[in-house]
Image (spheres, rainbow, N blue to C red):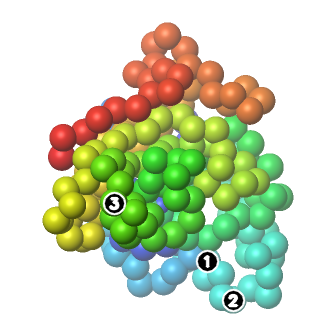
Amino acid sequence: MKKIVILISGGGSNLEAIAKACQTGNISASIELVISNQANVKGLERAKKFHLMSKVIEHQNFNSREEFDQALLEHILPIEPDLVVLAGFMRILSNEFTEAFNGKLINIHPSLLPDYPGLNTHKQAMENGDLMHGISVHFVNNELDGGPIIAQGALKIDPIESEAKLINRIHKIEHALYPKVISDIVKGYISLQGNEVKFETESYFGTNHMEFFNV
Ligand code: GRF
């Protein structure tokens, strides 16, 4: 059985979507550990609901990013995970961490990258009057939200909808696409070769995969 580790900081709705997919067999892997850098977040309750092992490692207890990342590595490396999944993990990772999991570390970002790396993506898309918004799943490298893109999901922005409504619709896309990407990676249908994402023919995805969602 392939092994996954998931890092969270908050709500954990993506964690829940992934846990469900593991439970139903849509992802052929087991979640070995959930790590949160924040205590008392809903994501930890969700981990409990799915009987997942979880651990809180609070970044503010460390003097530097490197020391915090070292603590993460100490917990993750012994598991020898096939994949480390960032699911709303709100910390920038050091080069040492990203290099330790090169090709085995993925992130979901709520924008159509390369548009809007960083925070407040929904607000920026709305304020700029964008017609489309979406999400990107990508391999993580040393560049913030800049690693090779695996797949994107898009929706049409309704100019009069609230930001909360837009975030809710974005989440629906995330919950549909992230488990599918994870499933294909653990099956070996998607891999990172140098700086390029390689898709086997069996993959649901392919180069420049952009899916439109009517959510
Ligand atoms: C998601 O929108 C994800 O794209 C971003 O953080 C959010 C996490 O949501 N990186 P949740 O904690 O999975 O509910």
Residue annotated with mark 2 = 61
Q: Residue at left 72%, top 54%? A: 143
Q: Which numbered tag is attached to residue 129?
A: 3
Q: Residue at left 48%, top 83%? A: 39
Q: Which numbered tag is attached to residue 24?
A: none
Residue annotated with mark 1 = 57
The three-letter code of the residue at mark 2 reads Asn
Quadrant in which residue 16 is drawn: bottom left
Q: Residue furthest front?
A: 129
Gap between marks 2 and 3, in whole Å?
41 Å
The three-letter code of the residue at mark 1 reads Ile
Against 203, is 137 above or below?
below
| Rendered location of residue 25, percent (x, y) | 33, 33
The three-letter code of the residue at mark 3 reads Gly
Depth check: 73 or 168 in front?
168
Q: Residue at left 67%, top 67%? A: 92
